[in-house]
Image (cartoon, rainbow, N blue to C red):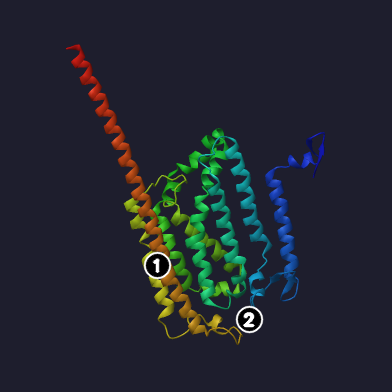
């Protein structure tokens, strides 16, 4: 709240500005928990204007355009994601105000906010009302969380922003000992990220974990977090702008990205080839509309195979373009250095001739 007095803005609630950020965060988290308790006490579905809170058990067929305004309201995870955006906005303004405009152009802000928006849309958007009904919808969500959202988040360089925001003294005392420790460097090795990217989706679908997520919301959202974490870890060495000891060369990056091909092919064939439904809870959902459970399973396999390979090819092309641009820049630097040396040699020869 503010008023204008003699051309100057006078802040009336200045004491609130002195409240520590952790206290604001804790208060907001408490409100999110209270909202969650209230929603759980409601009936099977509570209507909040254009927002639909669904228990994911008996889902009506989508009716357009109403389906575009169907969202799953989960206050706690939605609040945590919103808090991440607020933290980034404050940090982004701080680093630019302290001279890091070149390191943090506005497109980094757009990328990070876009990544969070993609997470919100995939987990709580219109598809969330049907991810306990259709395997194909569930597959799209996990694909977005492990393949598309992480590169956008990393383009925002949140770790670099965090380190700059800490300040030099706290970086030296707190951050650097952890970042330079052997356990942390071992855990952040690209091979660990590659293993997570391969094992997380594979074990999720071949073990009882997926069926457990259909019955327990904690497992359900834990799976979302696990997929997002595996994606961020996998893409970290590829997306520039984030501190890491493991700087992969462009040829190694292309080899690293080839892991996208077999995992997407394996999961695609795993769901497309069988002539029986793999997950009984999905087959037993009461509905008289949409594709059959087997056809839906085949849709999921086709999506994972086709779209997964397309994204892998696109990532390889981006790395190839960056590699070509780096080689071109290196060639220009070499040409400038060669021209400078020739000019210096010609000047020295001319001086010796004049002396003679």
- Residue 249 is left or right of residue 117, and the answer is left
Locate residue 160, reporting x and y percent.
51, 43
Distance from disc 1 to disc 2, alpha carbons, whole Å, reads 31 Å
Position of residue 165 relative to residue 26, above or below, is above
Q: Secondary structure at mark 1?
A: helix
Q: Residues within 10 Å of mark 1 (few under 14, many from 20)?
A: some
Taking the image as shown, residue 341 lies to the left or right of residue 256, namely: left
Q: Examine the rendered structure and indicate whether residue 313 appears above or below residue 98.
A: below
Decide if residue 327 is in sight here.
Answer: yes
* Label 1 vs 2, first from the N-terminus: 2
Q: Which mark is residue 356?
A: none
Residue designated by label 1 = 309
Tag 2 residue: 61
Above-or-below relation of 226 to 126: above
In which quadrant of the rendered view does residue 308 lie?
Answer: bottom left
The answer to whether residue 139 is left or right of residue 287 is: left
Q: Is residue 331 left or right of residue 207?
A: left
Where residue 342 sits in the image (x, y, percent)? Answer: 24, 28
Name the outermost residue toward the top: 355
Which residue is drawn at the image coordinates 67% and 65% (left, top)?
A: 74
Image spot of residue 208 (x, y percent): 50, 74
- Image quadrant for the C terminus? top left
Tell me if residue 249 can be seen.
Answer: no
Crowd tier of the residue under label 2, counting other residues whose Cα lies within 10 Å: few below 14, some 14–19, many 20 or above: few
């Amino acid at each position: 709240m503010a008023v204008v007095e003699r051309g100057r803005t006078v802040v009336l609630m200045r004491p609130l500005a002195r409240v520590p950020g952790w206290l604001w965060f804790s208060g907001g988290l408490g409100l999110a928990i209270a909202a969650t308790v209230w929603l759980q006490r409601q009936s099977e579905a509570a209507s909040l204007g254009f927002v639909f809170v669904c228990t994911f058990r008996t889902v009506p067929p989508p009716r357009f355009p109403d389906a575009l305004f169907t969202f799953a309201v989960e206050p706690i995870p939605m609040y945590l994601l919103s808090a991440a955006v607020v933290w980034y906005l404050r940090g982004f303004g701080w680093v630019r105000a302290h001279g890091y405009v070149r390191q943090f152009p506005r497109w980094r802000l757009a990328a990070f906010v876009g990544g969070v928006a993609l997470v919100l849309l995939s987990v709580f958007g219109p598809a969330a009302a049907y991810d306990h009904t259709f395997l194909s919808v569930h597959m799209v969500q996990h694909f977005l969380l492990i393949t598309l959202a992480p590169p956008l988040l990393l383009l925002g360089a949140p770790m670099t922003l965090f380190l700059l925001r800490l300040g030099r003294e706290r970086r030296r005392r707190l951050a650097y000992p952890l970042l330079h420790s052997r356990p942390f460097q071992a855990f952040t090795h690209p091979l660990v990220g590659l293993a997570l990217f391969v094992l997380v989706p594979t074990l999720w679908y071949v073990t009882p974990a997926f069926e457990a997520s259909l019955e327990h919301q904690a497992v359900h959202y834990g799976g979302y977090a696990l997929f997002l974490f595996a994606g961020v870890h996998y893409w970290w060495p590829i997306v520039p702008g984030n501190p890491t000891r493991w700087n992969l060369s462009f040829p190694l990056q292309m080899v690293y990205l080839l892991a996208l091909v077999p995992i997407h092919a394996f999961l695609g064939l795993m769901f497309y080839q069988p002539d029986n439904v793999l997950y009984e809870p999905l087959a037993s959902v009461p509905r008289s509309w949409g594709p059959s459970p087997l056809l839906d399973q085949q849709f999921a396999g086709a999506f994972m195979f086709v779209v997964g390979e397309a994204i892998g090819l696109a990532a390889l092309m981006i790395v190839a373009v960056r590699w070509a641009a780096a080689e071109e820049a290196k060639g220009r630097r070499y040409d400038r250095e060669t021209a400078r040396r020739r000019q210096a040699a010609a000047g020295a020869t001319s001086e010796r001739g004049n002396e003679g």
